[in-house]
Amino acid sequence: MASRSITCMTLALLLCGAALQSARAAEPGEAIRVGAVLPFSGGVELYGQQAKLGLDLAARDINAAGGILGRPVEVIYVDDKTRPGSAAEAMRSLVEKQNVLATVGPITSQNLNALVPIAESSKTPLLYATNYEGGKCSRYLFSFGAVPNQELGQLLPYMTRTFGNTYFLLGADRVWPHQMFGIAQPLIEKLGGKVVATKYTLGTETDFSPLIKEIAASKAKVLLFALKGDGMDFIRQADEAGLLKEITVAFLGLSEVDLGIFRGKGQNMVTVVPAVAASEDPAVKAFVAKARAAAEPGVAVSNYVITHYNTLIALKAAAEKAGKLDKGAIIDAMAGLAVPSPTGPVTLGQDHHAAMNMFIAKTQGSELVQVRALGEIAPEPGCSLAGR
């Protein structure tokens, strides 16, 4: 508790240390523009709205504390429509027409793949705050979300010990589920487990009963689930069919924002996340209360809010460490940077991925609740910047 209090004090100092000069310093400077390429349509817009809530909170806190090097921050949002072409067009516009200092986003791996080359060609920092499959190391990319060893690497041992060692893998036919399942299979086998089947949905299904029957017939003990956006109604149908009495869901990327989709179904599903909104930790409680006060009534607060909040806090810290608003200098300052967050320190390694506290959580009632705090987990991104 003492260390967490120190973390809170550090966050307050970072945001408010310039308070004596804030009003005078922030007024004269033109706003620093930060682009946000996020989905506000196309199937995963719930997560885009969560990201926007986190960025808006960070911009408000930063500006209240005097901005970045005395200049206010303005976030410019563009809808990537959950399509790579739209994402690429949005980022080019932000860099070329809006002269942004950095860009935050996107949500999906497919769109990330479209944006990294643009970040590299324009030499613009891209701050990515969603869990992903790893494997992308670039001078211009900084990952604030979990990579497989921080998520799968913690989830699979727990599931195998607690629920059984036979797995059915179910995901959407997209980049992220394919990559995550490719990583999961050898991990499961190393744990002495077995993958009995792997299936991918097309995104057009509305009746999941044939798939539910197939999973039930497999007799698997764990359903490793990577089905975000389209197809999420599978959980409700599976619960109503009785499947979830026979199998436990290990849900990749589950967050509080998903729970409304399940309409109270899907209890005791397990996940690993970088934050749990229902945490009793004082720093998390204070942040969640602030986020709920800023959000529309009824809007959930998830780890997406916190990880996206962290991107702008890190950008501020890097710019102030560099002492100037220069993209190259900020990129150099970001590597190795440790910044405070509501869940504890977030440290960006030399390969630009974040070490952070992780938590096992499960669905209970209308919330995710913490099962176990795992402590700080260093990332293993599956790539390296060495020699680049």
Image (tube, helix red, strand yellow):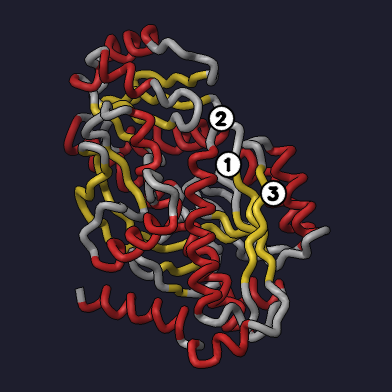
Percent x, y of residue 13: 41, 83
Percent x, y of residue 218: 29, 13
Which residue does the numbered mark 1 point to in the structure image?
A: 109
Vertical side of 282 occupied by 372: above or below: above
Percent x, y of residue 306: 42, 58
For marks 3 and 1, the one nearer the N-term is 1
- Give the crowd class for mark 2: few <14, some 14-19, many >=20 residues within 10 Å: some
Residue type pointed to by label 3: Leu
Residue type pointed to by label 1: Ser
Q: What residue appears at the point 24 percent right and 28 percent down from the top-left corner?
A: 248
Residue type pointed to by label 2: Arg
Q: CA distance from mark 1 to mark 2?
A: 9 Å
Which residue is nearer to you in this view: 218 or 60?
60
Which element is circle 2 on? loop
For marks 1 and 2, the one nearer the N-term is 1
Which residue does the numbered mark 2 point to in the structure image?
A: 174
For marks 3 and 2, the one nearer the N-term is 3
Q: CA distance from mark 3 to mark 1?
A: 10 Å
**Image quadrant where residue 41 sits:** top right
Q: CA distance from mark 3 to mark 2?
A: 17 Å
Residue 288 numbered tag: none
Q: What residue appears at the point 37 percent right and 40 percent down from the top-left corner?
A: 254
- Give the crowd class for mark 3: few <14, some 14-19, many >=20 residues within 10 Å: many
**Image quadrant where residue 279 sits:** bottom left
Which element is circle 1 on? helix
Q: What residue appears at the point 64 percent right and 42 percent down from the top-left corner?
A: 111
